[in-house]
Amino acid sequence: MNIGITDATLAIVTINKDMKSSNFPVFYAENEKELQDRALIISKTMGGMVHDVLHGTLIIVRH
């Protein structure tokens, strides 16, 4: 039996320049297209899934 943390937030991608985090890396985008492009590239690199949490903010989570 494997016991441990399997879900983890890996990064935040946002167009909101006021968003800060001391726990996760935050990547800023200038517009919606750049937001989607960055999130896709980062998620592929880190092996995560992209989730839309608020308008203009995406999180990348490993499941």
Image (cartoon, grey):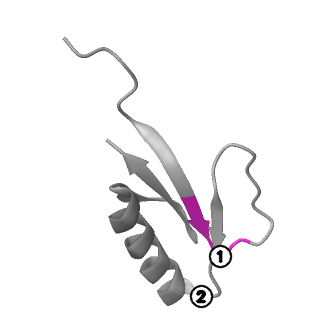
Q: Residue at x 45, y 39 (%)?
A: 8
Q: Residue at x 40, y 58 (%)?
A: 46
Q: Which mark is residue 15?
A: 1
Q: Is residue 21 left or right of residue 43?
A: right
Q: Is residue 54 magenta?
A: no
Residue picked out by circle 2: 31
- Amino acid on which the number 1 mark rests in the picture: Ile
Q: Quadrant of residue 28?
A: bottom right
Q: Position of residue 29 (x, y in %)?
A: 62, 80
Q: Residue at x 38, y 73 (%)?
A: 40
Q: Position of residue 37 (x, y in %)?
A: 43, 82
Q: Main secondary structure of the magenta part?
A: strand
Precedes in sequence: disc 2 or disc 1: 1
**Foreground residue among 16 and 9:** 9
In the rendered image, which quarter contains the N terminus? Answer: top left
Q: Is residue 39 left or right of residue 6?
A: right
Residue with the most extreme left position: 1
Residue with the most extreme right position: 18
- Amino acid on which the number 2 mark rests in the picture: Asn
Q: Position of residue 44 (x, y in %)?
A: 33, 66
**Foreground residue among 52 and 20:** 20
